Image (cartoon, helix red, strand yellow):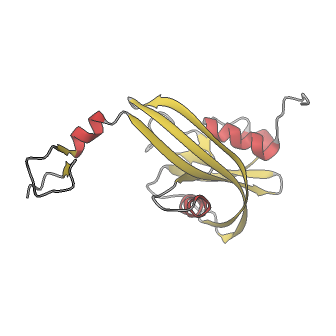
């Protein structure tokens, strides 16, 4: 059996006459990716918790976003939000209610990305704020609305600010 991380497109991995691809070849032909994530809006009186993206997120490093991330296969969205928030912030949270669910599509890294995002209002139940080590975020901080609106924010960060504090445009619906 070859040890070159070969991935077979047929169920019988012992039949080498079947089409097979290395991981590198498979990545080159995958052009559409769907990613489902769960994120939390955490409030501390009049402040919202945001996380800064690290250099592991090319093109977005230094920008701020909501804590959260990808849902693992078979994982419940609320459980994913709780896990991801704890990984990024050290805080233990309780999901309260879904405040937004949406999708967006864009090109990223030569691939057509479809992101589905589920955003929860969550309550801090314990833990101590800390920064993720060697992850996609490198800092987490509480910000007032005024402070948050001056930060470099990714789209999800902007949406989180709107959900946390409402629109500051002054217009009524």
Q: Position of residue 85 (x, y in %)?
A: 59, 59
Q: Quadrant of the N terminus?
A: bottom left
Residue 124: quadrant of the picture: bottom right
Q: Quadrant of the C terminus?
A: top right
Q: Residue furthest bottom?
A: 126
Residue 84 lies left or right of residue 108; in this view the side is: right
Q: Residue at x 55, y 50 (%)?
A: 37
Front residue of 172/146: it is: 172
Residue 19 lies left or right of residue 126; in this view the side is: left
Front residue of 121/16: it is: 16
Q: Position of residue 107 (x, y in %)?
A: 46, 28
Q: Position of residue 133 (x, y in %)?
A: 47, 58
12 in relation to 106, above or below: below
Q: Residue at x 12, y 56 (%)?
A: 3
| Number of marks present in the image shown | 0
Q: Residue at x 51, y 29 (%)?
A: 106
Residue 102: quadrant of the picture: top right
Residue 140 lies left or right of residue 166; in this view the side is: left
Residue 41 lies left or right of residue 114; in this view the side is: right
Front residue of 37/46: it is: 37
91 in relation to 149, above or below: below
Query: Is residue 127 in view from this perspective?
Result: yes
Query: Is residue 61 in view from this perspective?
Result: no
Q: Position of residue 49 (x, y in %)?
A: 69, 52
């Amino acid at each position: 059996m070859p040890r070159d991380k070969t991935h077979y497109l047929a169920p019988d991995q012992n039949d080498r006459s079947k089409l097979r691809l290395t991981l590198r070849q498979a990545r080159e032909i995958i052009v559409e990716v769907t990613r489902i994530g769960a994120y939390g809006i955490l409030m501390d009186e009049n402040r919202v918790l945001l996380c800064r993206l690290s250099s592991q997120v090319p093109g977005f490093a230094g920008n701020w976003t909501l804590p959260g991330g990808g849902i693992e296969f078979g994982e419940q969205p609320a459980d994913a939000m709780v896990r991801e928030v704890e990984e990024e912030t050290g805080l233990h949270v309780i999901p309260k209610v879904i405040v937004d669910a949406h999708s967006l599509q864009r090109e990223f890294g030569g691939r057509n990305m479809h992101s589905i995002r589920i955003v929860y209002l969550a309550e801090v139940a314990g833990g101590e704020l800390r920064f993720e080590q060697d992850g996609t975020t490198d800092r987490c901080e509480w910000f007032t609305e005024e402070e948050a609106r001056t930060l470099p924010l990714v789209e999800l960060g902007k949406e989180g600010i709107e959900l946390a504090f409402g629109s500051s445009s002054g217009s009524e619906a």
